[in-house]
Amino acid sequence: MTMNIIDLFLLLILVASVIFSLYRGSVSSALGFFVSLLSLLLAGLFYPQLVQLLSRNKAVMQLLVTYTDAGSLVGDYSLAMSPAAGLTGTALESVMKGVGLPIGIESLLRANMQSLSLAPFGLSTVNEYVSHTVVMAVIQSLSYTICFFLCFVVLHTVINAIGHTTYFPLLRHGESITAAIFGLLRGAVVVFVICQLTPIVLTVIPVRQVTALFSESSLMSFFYSNSAFHLIVNGV
């Protein structure tokens, strides 16, 4: 198995988590793993509020439109200005091919256009659907990631504070291997969250070399999940 720079970065996170766990011990490492799982759940509870806050900020929205180039992805002006309501078959496929979005966001755009889910927001043209879907996907994905790492850091800080004042017992057998396993699992959760940013990175940096790095990354392919991405992001 060949590894590229993305694999090395993700592997570094896993190794660092294992080393830290060996230093902290099995009990602290087990708590750290469960805290990382709790962070996944808490992020799911809190990130919609951050999404609302960011999406209501016109400066943030305009900045994201600029960086994602969402306003000009369609390319064909007449197609971009055509109503999404009448777009089916060949015309819809032309839009999908023209925008060239990663599969995770392309499927969201397709679903939004087929169901006209953005009509309640007063959006009707193809360009408006593309721009809104891309920008909201970025906001939703980044919001979840920010909330996860905030929860992760805060909860781990609490655990470390408790560890400095409370003695965590050591296992009589298998202390090191148990600590390493929990460290690896915790690192895997962190890597999993990072990998769900893949469609966002490929949208913001639509460079062939970058796309190739991500597609050739073995660890990225293992940890990224379209289903998980769509649990976080709906592009609406």
Image (spheres, rainbow, N blue to C red):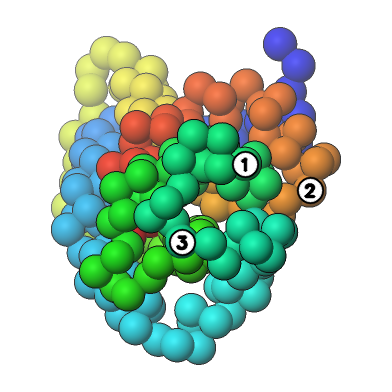
Work out how far the residue at label 1 is from the one at label 2, CA to CA, in angstroms: 21 Å
Crowding at mark 1 (Cα within 10 Å: few <14, some 14-19, many 20+): some
Residue type at tag 3: Pro
Q: Nearer the viewer, residue 11 or 26?
A: 11
Residue named by callout 2: 207
- Label 1, on which residue? 94
Count all numbered tags in the image, as a single digit.
3
Identify the mark nearer the N-term, 3 or 1.
Answer: 3
- In the rendered view, does 24 fall on the left or right side of 60? left
Name the residue located 29 percent from the left edge and 65 percent from the top edge. 119
Looking at the figure, which quarter contains the C terminus? bottom left
Vertical position of residue 62 compared to residue 49: above or below: below
Q: Which amino acid does the dot numbered 2 rest on?
A: Val
Residue that carries the numbered disc 3 in the rendered image: 83
Q: Please rate how many residues cluster around mark 3, counting C-alpha atoms within 10 Å: few if below 14, some from 14 to 19, many from 20.
A: some
Residue drawn 56% across the image and 35% down it: 90
Task: Give the vertical position of 139 relative to 42 (above or below).
Answer: below
Q: Mark 3 and mark 1: span between their CA atoms?
A: 14 Å
Question: Helix, strand or loop at disc 2?
Answer: loop
Residue 66 seen in the figure = yes
Residue furthest toward the front? 86
